[in-house]
Image: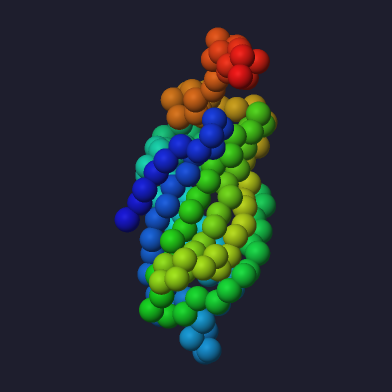
Amino acid sequence: MSQKKKIGLQQLTNSTIVPVRFSEVDALGIVWHGHYLKFFEDGREAFGREYELGYLDAYKHKFATPLVKINVDFKKIVKYGDQVKIVTTYSDSPAAKILFKYEVFRLSDGELVAMGESIQVFMNMEHELHITIPPFFEEWKKKNLKTETLTHKKSLLSQSINN
């Protein structure tokens, strides 16, 4: 189950729900810390399906998007049998990279159980780092990110002055 919505001007978000699988828990019956990275990947893949920014979408344009940084802050435990809601938020950057922030909630009570962020870069098929924004990603941004126009900004300024 996925749900998408736009946040502000330069962020997009996706929510997806996944069950905690038996293979993800340790001997204590709680999710082993390394599997939170898998939850983040579940979030990235759901985001990619919704917004056409998945690994295969980049690959069609002869790019890979490897992770170069990822971090997790653990807040609460999750057990086998629970379901988690993964909220994945894309944050725009002027650099040639993809920034995601994650929030993982236990579905039964809405508790925030983990949060984190990741950075992906663009690499061509020769495994060379691409330091400028690829054309397909520029087009993706134009299609998915809405920016205020100067006219709209003037209108907002005029309203605030008149009030």
Q: Residue at x 42, y 52 (%)?
A: 15
Instruction: Pinpoint residue 112: horizontal percent, then vertical percent.
Output: 55, 65
Q: Is residue 104 left or right of residue 162?
A: left
**Above or below, 15 relative to 95:** below
Name the residue at the bottom extreme: 27
Query: What colouring does the structure picture have?
Result: rainbow
Specify the farthest residue to the left: 1
Q: Quadrant of the N terminus?
A: bottom left
x, y percent for residue 120: 60, 44
Q: Residue at x 58, y 74 (%)?
A: 76
Q: Quadrant of residue 103?
A: bottom right
Residue located at (65% from left, 15% from top): 161
Classify residue 103 as left or right of residue 72. left
Pinpoint residue 102: horizontal percent, then vertical percent: 55, 54
Q: Is residue 130 visible?
A: no
Q: Position of residue 11 (x, y in %)?
A: 54, 37
Using the image as rendered, state which of residue 15 and residue 71 is in the foreground.
15
Residue placed most toward the observer, 38 or 62:
38
Residue 107 visible at all: yes
Quarter of the figure that contains the C terminus:
top right
Residue that appears at 54% across and 42% down: 90
Q: Quadrant of residue 99?
A: top right
Q: Is residue 145 above or below residue 43?
A: above
Looking at the image, how many numbered discs can be counted on the residues? 0
